[in-house]
Image (tube, coloured by chain):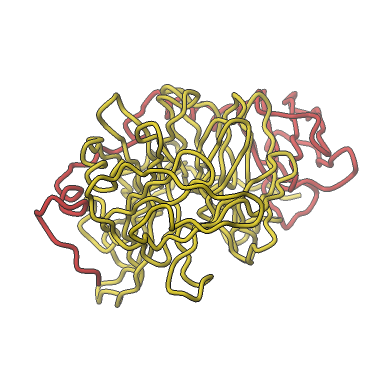
Amino acid sequence: MSLWRWPAQVSTYSYCGLGSTGVSNSNRQGAFWGGRALATLKAAYADAPHWRGTFLASTPAVDAPWHLPQLPAPTVAQDRWTAWVQRGRLRAVLPWTEDPRAFTLRGAAHMLFSRKNLNYYKKVWLARLEPTYREVLLNFSRSGAHENNWVPIPHGDELYALYTICDHRRRGDGTGESLVLRCDPRSGHCKRAFSSSSSYPASASASATSSSSTTTTSTSDNDGSRARTACPSGLRGGSPLVKLGETSLVGVAHRTLTQEPRRSGGTDRRYVHYLYRLEAQPPFRLLNVSAAFSFPRWFNSSLDDIQFGAGLARRGADSLALSFGVGDCAALEVRVPVARVRAWVGG
Amino acid sequence: MMDIPENDGSPSSFMRSLTPRLLIGSDTRALAQLRRHLANDTRIVSFGDDTHVPVLPAGGEKLRSRTGRRLPLGFIYNPTLLDDEDDGGAIVKARANLRITLSFCSRATSVALTR
């Protein structure tokens, strides 16, 4: 048996490595000590009594040997960890978990997360974090080889997951499908619970289409005269959902646009984000989507093309905190007045 | 490239006007805890397959689950997260007097080492 030793000093650790972006080993978002590196990719706030003042953060390998090619992972690609920080204290570091979405279910802290297998296909997992850790793969009959970006919707003692926000591929009529699953936290088995059109017809009551097991009912969306934005195809979940008023939830979603890579390097993808509003009750019908936005630039380089809104939480009565990652290496937060959000998505 | 208007009260122009706050990094308390965990409470364990080079430096045992299944690498730093009732859960004494608790979750991806 051979012994692997961490070099005394690591001076070349870089996680912000999208081409020649100029963001190199200094990794100003990370923390270095004794040759070990911690860099936070994304911070994921959540808004639930259990999680108040807490966040989960995706980090690259905290103790970095998994990045070395001669150390293959046995079953999963081990390049993401989650640090669970609660009221400033580290509660746990959870290996091989990416893009955590925290929520409270049946009084216990949970998270949905993604995990890559050795082929770098992602699957969605559910973890109960307390009182004892337990995780289960979430499976849905329609799941593909690559699954991520499910959004947890805890409701009473039930766990729902927003599978698609507006998937235009599933419908042949030019409208998008919003699909909600009901998942068994014990077995991980998920079933189709509700689906509805996300086409925003003039009459809200006409927009929902009945789905497999549950009759869809219409509710007033209190939108006033606000104009609705068409739901863009390819919209995917990002953050957990936060209550907006008594009858609706709001979340941050994203989609990727393709672009020509810059001559100086960078990526051919660019992320844009949207706020969206759902009914707070089953069938969690999609009510509105904001115009597209990008988070503030941080690096002033092509790294800023890779943004990911991973967290959302109330901060007082009048403000929302949006946490997001930039360049897969910086975890940042902005505050947005609730009034602004209402102006963008209604409610 | 999507055409996003500027300075018009839209989500895009508003967001771009904000100054983001860097998270963690400045959270020295949590970072200090994490550092202690890394420095004191964790070691890398080999599970009998030399292609997985890391070992417990002080001479850890080759670890198998109760069912004899070879275990992969992994850590959980908080012993309260452990669930011995999970399939294959095991407690192993290593020669260095490290108490090694294995939480063998549904896909065998969690192993904990605690002092």
Q: Let me know if residue A40 appears in the view.
A: no
Q: Residue at x 62, y 51 (%)?
A: A193
Q: Residue at x 58, y 31 (%)?
A: A156
What is the x, y in percent for residue A111?
Answer: 56, 39
Rendered position, A213 above or below A338? below
Q: Looking at this view, name the residue that lies furthest to the left.
A: B7
Chain B appears what colour?
A: red
Of A52 and A56, nearer the camera is A52
Left or right of A133? Residue A312 is: left
What is the x, y in percent for residue A101?
Answer: 50, 42
Of A270 and A177, nearer the camera is A177
Q: Residue at x 72, y 58 (%)?
A: B51
Q: Please tell me in which quadrant of the rendered image residue A55 appears.
A: top left
Please identify the quadrant where the N terminus of chain B is shown. bottom left
Q: Please tell me in which quadrant of the rendered image residue B89 appears.
A: top right
Rendered position, A262 above or below A109? below
Q: Looking at this view, name the residue that lies furthest to the right.
A: B67
Of A204 and A95, nearer the camera is A204
What is the x, y in percent for residue A344?
Answer: 24, 48
Please identify the quadrant where the C terminus of chain B is shown. top right
Q: Residue at x 76, y 39 (%)?
A: B104
Chain A appears what colour?
A: yellow
Left or right of A342? Residue B33 is: right
Rendered position, B14 above or below A333? below
What is the x, y in percent for residue B84?
Answer: 79, 29
